[in-house]
Image: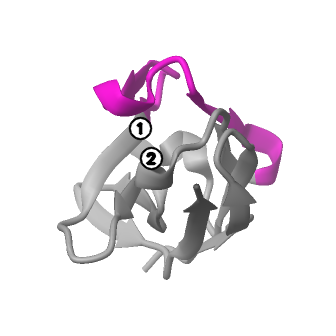
Amino acid sequence: QVQLVESGGGLVQSGGSLRLSCTASRNILSANTMGWYRQPPGKERELVADMSRGGSTNYVDSVKDRFTLSREIIKNTVYLQMNSLKAEDTAVYYCKGVWNAMNNWGKGTLVTVSS
């Protein structure tokens, strides 16, 4: 089981920015994918962005041009830079990593955007 620890959530005003971090207990270059999901209040969990082992990124349309997924391999950490935040971005954000076809999830970090 791989441990994933998220940080960086909090309360921010609409239009503001936050950076989420996710540190893995295993080499992230050995993961098939690393990414971020979110679960808004009363809704299902959804993909926000993910990155392949080779570094290709994929974003849900609603966050394109506002969010950026990156990684720092030496720290086994992935980041989600979130700019121009909107009230609808309010959610618990979860880090997910896939190693050997097994999903590993963090416990989540809450992002609240006030309008």
114 with respect to 21 (left or right) = left
The quadrant where residue 46 appears: bottom left
Percent across and percent down for residue 80 are 62, 43
| Residue 49 numbered mark, or none | 1
Percent across and percent down for residue 76 are 71, 52
| Residue 35 numbered mark, or none | 2
Q: Residue furthest front?
A: 115
Residue located at (18% from left, 67% from top): 44
Percent across and percent down for residue 26 are 60, 63
Q: Nearer the viewer, residue 12 or 57?
A: 12
Between discs 2 and 1, the one toward the N terminus: 2
Distance, label 2 to label 1, CA atoms, is: 6 Å
- CB atoms at circles 2 and 1 under 8 Å apart? yes
Q: Is residue 31 visible?
A: yes
Residue located at (57% from left, 26% from top): 66
SS state under label 2: strand
| Residue 60 numbered mark, or none | none
In this picture, which residue range is highlighted in magenta?
51-75
Give the total number of marks visible in the rendering. 2
Percent across and percent down for residue 4 are 56, 71
Residue located at (62% from left, 53% from top): 27
Task: Report if residue 22 lies within the magenta region.
Answer: no
Q: Amino acid at mark 2?
A: Gly
Q: Amino acid at mark 1?
A: Ala
